[in-house]
Amino acid sequence: MSEHIVSPKIYLGIFAALMILTATTVYAATVDLNEHFPGLNVIVALVIATCKAILVILFFMHAYYSSKRTKLIIFSGFFWLAIMLALTLSDYGSRTWDLH
Amino acid sequence: MSTSPTTPAVHQLPEEHYLNSTYGLRSWLLTTDHKRIALLYLASVTFFFFIGGIFATMIRIHLLTPNGYLVTPETYNKLFTMHGVAMIFFFLIPSIPAVLGNFLVPLMIGAKDLAFPKINLLSWYIYLVGGCFVLYSFATGGLDTGWTFYTPLSSVYSNSAVTPAVIGIFINGFSSILTGLNFVVTIHTMRAPGMTWFRLPLFVWAQYATSIIFILGTPVIAITLLLVGLERMFHLGFFNPALGGDPILFQHLFWFYSHPAVYIMILPAMGVISEIIPTFTRKPIFGYTFIAASSIAIAVIGFFVWAHHMFLTGESTYAALAFSLLSYLVAIPSAVKVFNWTSTLYRGSISYDTPLLYSLGFIGLFLIGGLTGLFLACLGLDIHIHDTYFVVAHFHYIMVGGAVMGYVGGLHFWWPKITGKLYPEFLARMAAVILFVGFNLTFFPQFILGYLGMPRRYHNYPPEFQVLNVMSTAGASILALGYLLPMLYLTWSMRYGKVAGPNPWPATGLEWRTPSPPPTENFDVTPVVDWEAYDFKNRPDLGLTQPSGPALSPAHGDD
Ligand code: HEM
Ligand SMILES: [Cu+2]
């Protein structure tokens, strides 16, 4: 369980990547993507946000250098979140009436 | 340690042990010894049990007459809410993990302490801070939302002190998370040489499964209640339709944690039962692997059933169908345990000692509680009995008849280890029987009341329901006596009880291979495990295989 020393280069690289992705988010928000596919704007924003979160977890939080067991724990956290979202949405998505 | 229990040995307390190694308030409040922290938790959960008990008593007195003369309807709402909050979040959830689990997990796996002793102490302080917020809420206006905090009542309409209560439960959640984290790391990394996963006592498996729920579920309830607080204080729209929120979303988030939380309460009790039964039948437990695996299965499947609490909310019929089916599935691992326990009893050399009485009570009451859960999970039937006393009886059979019986039984079973003293056996058996009788008299009538249509959480009822309500209140008084007795004689025994010796029953776990009370470091030398769990045959150190001498029975405080 020794500490892994990560070189500043990698940190700076990740930082740069995060900044570029942030800029992309801002830019994507100014383009009307919903025209092509309803909801695409949100999807694009979420995909970028997910990439950023993954970078932070892998490198800033050292998950990339951790043991398999730690990775499993991190993964199960997200998996459980997915259970919560999926089953909750299964209710909203399958209601037989429409209240708009 | 080597004295054979067949000769009625006169035991002496070890000269130095964890209770007398240091003195003074400081040595307790700043301790990092898991055994002392367990006792700190014991005192604090007992305190909340009292608080919750006072509210319960007032509820039952109020319901003696159809029009309830004791309190106003508003106060009645507060009584059942505060009863539920105190009992669930501050007694039942921490009871077995933080008291018995804290004390036993390191001892059972042959470790000197938990992996993070300071975090362990921190979790107790967090519990206290959370508890203070909740007590503050009780004292300044009370709480009337039900322990379920349903929105928009809790976030908009309630005039009671909801905000401090949700903050208190939010804070308290971190205490659970830290305890769970501590157990998981400890069980993974600190097992003694030879203590393989499948030699772990089933109590440890149960704590492990519970810890999974602590870690993966508790953050959700903490954040959800925080959102209620934010909506209440700052009118942010999460659950209030007027602000663009959705009240049903609250129920999804609440039950995503709170159904698994009912397994937080019952799984550790199942672990206790799995320790007691082999000890008092002198047999290895039947189906070890199945019991261990069923704990994990319950922990995982328990996360897939939550919307069975919402069948009547207007949730989608298709989702309700799936959740109903999944709820039936969770009964399978529970049944696996019950069948394995009864198979262990079969042709065992049974001695009806106090802990075993509690275990037998547990099996019967859990069975009724679990099976009525299946009634409730049935989509059609639930329309009739949802939010009636049937539900109240269902969960009290499991939580009081199951979890509390397991806790009290476990306290008796390990009391000689914790204090080094034996309690008076006759009184203890009496108390166990009184509890069983009082419990059934209190809660069985509630099944009937509910089936006849008496709604829960109402402060009055039609006169034809009075007889059953009076029975229930009468049972509650017997129940109260049943709880007072152990408190009295257990406290008495700490000073005046007979010295227990290291292994009075005898039982097979590692915790019984060290003096009672154990030294601060738990073991003088790190134990090496070369036997399978619950193996009475290959354990000459238990003194059971002696060719001559009187038949061996467990040591009692009053023979
Ligand atoms: C065999 C597995 C179980 C099944 C299938 C089951 C099913 C159910 C269902 C369907 C309800 C909702 C009833 C309604 O509101 O109409 C319910 C309520 C409840 N159950 Fe269970 N249950 C099971 C085990 C447990 C256990 C082990 C516990 C506690 C340790 C528990 C505690 C509760 C509580 C506290 C409620 C009421 C919550 C409230 O509305 O205040 N159940 N159960
Ligand atoms: Cu449930």
Image: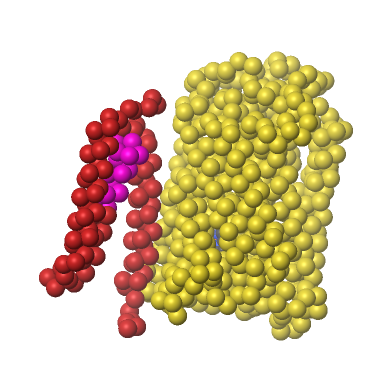
Chain colours: A red, B yellow
Report if residue A51 lies within the magenta region. yes
Q: Name the residue: 80% across, 43% down.
A: B428
Residue B375: percent from the left, percent from the top? Answer: 52, 67
Residue B359, how many percent across, how many down? 66, 45
Towards the viewer: B254 or B328: B254
**In this rendering, does residue B59 appear at all?**
yes
Residue at (53, 31) in percent of width and height: B115
Q: Can residue B377 be seen in this view?
A: no
User: Number of callouts in the render?
Assistant: 0
Q: Height in image: B86 above or below B294?
A: below
**Of A68 and B24, which appears nearest the observer?**
B24
Per the picture, the main secondary structure of the magenta-coloured stretch is helix
Q: From the image, which quarter does the C terminus of chain B lie in?
A: top right
**Residue B84 appears left or right of A94:** right
Q: In which quarter of the image is the N terminus of chain B?
A: top right
**As drawn, which residue projects farthest toward the left?**
A36
Which quadrant of the structure image shows residue B136? bottom right
The x, y position of residue A46, in whole percent, is: 26, 59
Query: In the rendering, at what x and y percent does residue B117 appear?
Result: 58, 32
Q: Give the residues drawn in magenta, as a range.
A: A50-64
Direction from residue B129 to residue B188 in the image, left or right: left
State the residue at coordinates (33%, 39%): A60
Q: Nearer the viewer, residue B350 or A82?
A: A82
Left or right: B340 as drawn, with respect to A69: right
Q: Name which residue lies at 58% across and 77% down.
A: B157
Give yes or no for residue B243 being in the magenta stretch: no
Q: Considering depth in this image, is B241 or B443 the residue closer to the camera? A: B241
Determine which quarter of the picture holds residue B203: top right
Ligand 1 resides in the quarter of the picture at bottom right
Q: Is residue B364 left or right of residue B384?
A: right
